[in-house]
Image (spheres, rainbow, N blue to C red):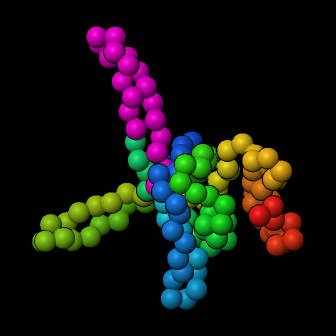
Amino acid sequence: MAKGLNKVMLIGHLGKDPELKYTEKGTAYCTFSVATSESYKDDNGNRVDKTEWHNIVVWRKLAEICGQYLKKGSKIYCEGKLQTDSYEKDGVKRYSTKIVMTDMSMLDSKPAGEKTLEEVSDKINKGEEEKDDDLPF
């Protein structure tokens, strides 16, 4: 019998620039939010747009890549898992849910004269690092 499955796949836009930080032991982590949108017609035939916001955290090398290449408005495909944390505030137990991202592809189109984001994404997915000489900026 299967142990279970905790997998999230999103396509959306970053709501703010990623915040790259390091733990006391030097492990990189990056946080940002991603907006996913949908639209539908309500019972009266009016178009309704709905946006959901997702808090994302990413660790290690992928965190550094996100901090370097992503910015507010970037369109990405992200894979990861849900993680719920609990904390106490004013004597009340509260919960927060985030997505721990494990894989990402950048979906924006290429600015003129620069490498395609698909080329950069391929390097990310293969675990290759870019040399400073190869960077278009």
Describe residue 89's horizontal placement relative to residue 101 as left or right.
Answer: left
Residue 91 found in image quarter: bottom left
Which quadrant does the C terminus fall into? bottom right
Nearer the observer, 29 or 99: 29
| Residue at image coords 59%, 49% | 74
| Residue at image coords 13%, 71% | 90
Where is residue 48 shown, x and y percent of the image?
A: 36, 24
Where is residue 49 shown, x and y percent of the image?
A: 39, 28
Nearer the observer, 102 or 69: 69
Residue 41 found in image quarter: top left
Where is residue 121 shown, x and y percent of the image?
A: 75, 54
Describe residue 3's horizontal placement relative to residue 52 as left or right.
Answer: right
Is residue 107 in view? yes
Residue 71 found in image quarter: bottom right
Nearer the observer, 108 or 1: 108
Q: Is residue 130 above or below residue 112?
A: below
| Residue at image coords 51%, 83% | 23
* 63 in the magenta segment: no
Is residue 81 in view? no
- Magenta part mainly helix, strand or loop? strand
Q: How many marks?
A: 0
Bounds of the magenta span? 33-51
Residue at the outermost bottom position: 25
Residue at the outermost left position: 91
Describe residue 118's horizontal placement relative to residue 48 as left or right.
Answer: right
Residue at the outermost top position: 44
Where is residue 105 shown, x and y percent of the image?
A: 68, 50
